[in-house]
Image (spheres, helix red, strand yellow):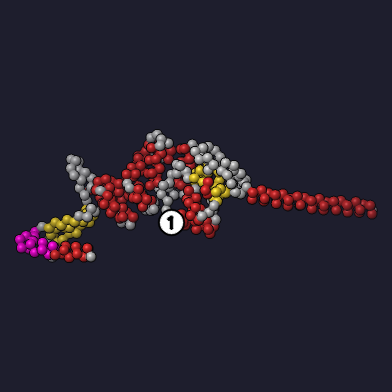
């Protein structure tokens, strides 16, 4: 019996030693794995990436370059600063997506994440979290991946499309409107209309791009027509009205139509911005005063004759002289 007890004790002791040895090995492996992950967390050279199992790593911001076919052209400085504050409070929640192109040796080319890169730069960060796409991307694919990512987040505006689509056609990335339209899932007529917005000054597009939820293609296209038909001063007036939310699409259509050339090819008729009508005390119409976007004011009265007409002219002259002096002062 004593021998049996000694044997049992030795077996139990051996099992305990084995458990301790196994636990020590596991602890050692955990330390090694942690060290390995820390070692590959930062990539020093774009030419020699070491990717963690999660696919997320850090790259130097100085080694990141913008997508040469970036679908966006207009970035709001306020939203960039807001994203930078989010980085400060919550960290970078989503990595940027990058690839490598022969045209940019030793660099990471951004597929998606230009706003995040700009936010990091504004903070003075040295590194940014990224995921790498190892496959070789064609120029069209490089554009479309970024375009669709922006669409999913509702960040792509018609004003960005105008600039990007014109460039894609000019550089031969797409040969014709129909090919581009099929790629982005839009009708050729829509693509054509958007590209025509490039006739607006860049300053106009930049200002409208700040309000993509309230200012769209219909506003911009009619503003383009107003610019072509009535000139820049009138267009600037209506741009201001659009940005202030006082110009509906219907109103812009009316202005654009009123300023269109006549069918006979005569001079273009500039539509007034506002009108003041005058009546006598008994309700009889006297006429009206029209205010135009190009600075003109026209007064037209009827039924005022003789001495009454002369007195009216003298009083108006006095009024205008006083107003002119106030304006100069």
Left or right: 230, with 212 as reference point: left
Look at 38% across and 40% down and name the residue there: 166
Q: Can residue 182 be spotted in the picture?
A: no
Left or right: 247, with 73 as reference point: left
Task: Give yes or no for residue 211 being in the magenta stretch.
Answer: no
Q: Which residue is label 1 attached to?
A: 78
Badge 1: residue crowd in 10 Å (few <14, some 14–19, many ≥20): few
Look at 14% across and 65% down and name the residue there: 318
Left or right: 31, with 261 as reference point: right
The x, y position of residue 231, in whole percent, is 25, 48
- Stretch of the chain drawn in magenta: 303-317
The x, y position of residue 256, in whole percent, is 26, 48
Q: Nearer the viewer, residue 208 or 323?
A: 323
Quick check: 327 above or below 126? below
The majority secondary structure of the magenta stretch comes to helix
Quadrant of the rendered image containing residue 135: top right
Q: Nearer the viewer, residue 18 or 311?
A: 311
The x, y position of residue 155, in whole percent, is 44, 49
Q: Secondary structure at mark 1?
A: helix
């Amino acid at each position: 019996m004593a021998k049996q007890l000694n044997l049992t004790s030795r077996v139990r002791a051996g099992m305990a030693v084995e458990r301790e040895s196994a636990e020590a090995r596991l602890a050692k492996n955990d330390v090694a794995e942690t060290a390995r992950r820390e070692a590959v967390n930062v990539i020093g050279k774009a030419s020699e990436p070491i990717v963690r199992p999660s696919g997320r790593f850090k790259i130097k911001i100085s080694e990141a370059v913008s997508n040469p076919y970036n679908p966006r052209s207009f970035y709001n400085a306020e939203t960039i600063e807001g994203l930078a504050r989010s980085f400060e409070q919550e960290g970078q929640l989503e990595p940027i997506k990058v690839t490598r192109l022969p045209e940019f040796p030793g660099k990471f080319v951004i597929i998606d994440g230009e706003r995040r890169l700009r936010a990091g730069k504004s903070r003075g960060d040295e590194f940014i979290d990224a995921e790498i796409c190892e496959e070789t991307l064609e120029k069209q694919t490089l554009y479309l991946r970024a375009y669709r990512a922006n669409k999913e987040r509702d960040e792509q505006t018609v004003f960005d499309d105008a600039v990007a689509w014109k460039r894609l056609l000019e550089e031969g990335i797409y040969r014709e409107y129909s090919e581009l339209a099929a790629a982005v899932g839009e009708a050729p007529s829509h693509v054509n209309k958007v590209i025509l917005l490039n006739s607006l000054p860049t300053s106009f597009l930049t200002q409208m791009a700040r309000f993509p939820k309230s200012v769209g293609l219909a506003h911009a296209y009619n503003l383009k027509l107003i610019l072509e038909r009535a000139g820049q001063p009138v267009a600037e007036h209506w741009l201001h009205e659009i940005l202030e939310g006082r110009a509906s699409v219907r109103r812009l259509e009316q202005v654009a139509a009123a300023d269109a050339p006549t069918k006979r090819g005569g001079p273009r008729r500039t539509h007034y911005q506002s009108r003041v009508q005058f009546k006598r005390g008994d309700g009889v119409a006297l006429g009206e005063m029209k205010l135009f976007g190009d600075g003109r004011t026209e007064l037209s009265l009827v039924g005022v004759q003789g001495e009454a007409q002369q007195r009216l002219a003298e009083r108006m002259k006095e009024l205008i002289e006083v107003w002119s002096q106030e304006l100069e002062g």
